[in-house]
Amino acid sequence: MSTTEINQSVLRQLDKMTDLVDIQDIAPVAFSAERLKPGSGSQLQLGVSAAAAPTEQSLSYKFDLSGTIQDDDDVDVATFAISMVITYVPRSASPEVAVPDDAESLKAFGDYVAWREVYPYLREGMQTVLARLRIHGFQLPMVRPQDGLIPDTMN
């Protein structure tokens, strides 16, 4: 979904939410990788899931990135999984200043703010666990700020 496809109400909520919170922490919570056979592979299959956990004192998102490296015959060479949690805290301790916690606002904030902020850590984590398996040549693309979540393809 592009920013232009979000309704104006959600855009206002995003602006409000980004003004109300600061990042407290971005932390890895799980890394795993397993080499299943020799070789470097030629294909990367990825999956991403996310969940929000709002409380009165914080707002956290957990992002899980999992993937499989396959060879030319679609046989798995390696698998990996990385989980990161990003936590936001209110800028103000005042109870009158509440962070919106409705599902639509939380999803939009996760998709357009938290994802951008955690993405470099997931990108680095993937590269690190694959390097430990001596599998090189796979890298998540860069995200260009001017394009939102459109990856920058490198030639």
Image (spheres, grey):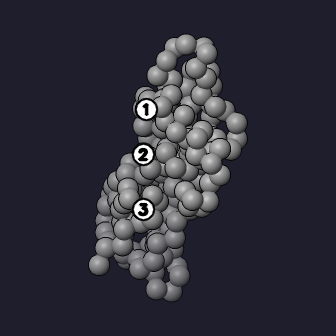
Can residue 110 be seen here? The reply is yes
Viewer can see residue 125:
no
Instruction: Name the quadrant containing residue 127.
Output: bottom left
Query: Mark 2: which amino acid?
Result: Glu
Amino acid type indicated by mark 3: Asp
- Name the residue: 70% across, 36% down: 102
Amino acid type assigned to the residue bearing label 1 in the image? Ile
Decide if residue 61 is on the left or right side of residue 71: right
Decide: is 39 above or below 28: below
**Residue 117, image x, y percentages:** 42, 45
| Number of marks | 3
How far from the left and from the top, in percent, is residue 131?
A: 31, 61
Q: Residue furthest front?
A: 8
Q: Which of marks 2 and 3 is in front?
A: 3
Q: Which of marks 1 and 3 is nearer the N terminus?
A: 1
Question: Callout 2: 10 Å neighbours few (<14), some, many (20+)?
Answer: some
Which quadrant of the view contains residue 3? bottom right
For disc 1, the neighbor class at 10 Å (few under 14, some 14 to 19, many from 20) is some
Q: Mark 3 points at which residue?
A: 147
Q: Where is residue 108 in the image (x, y as percent from the top left)?
A: 60, 47
- SS at badge 3: helix
Residue wearing tag 2: 117
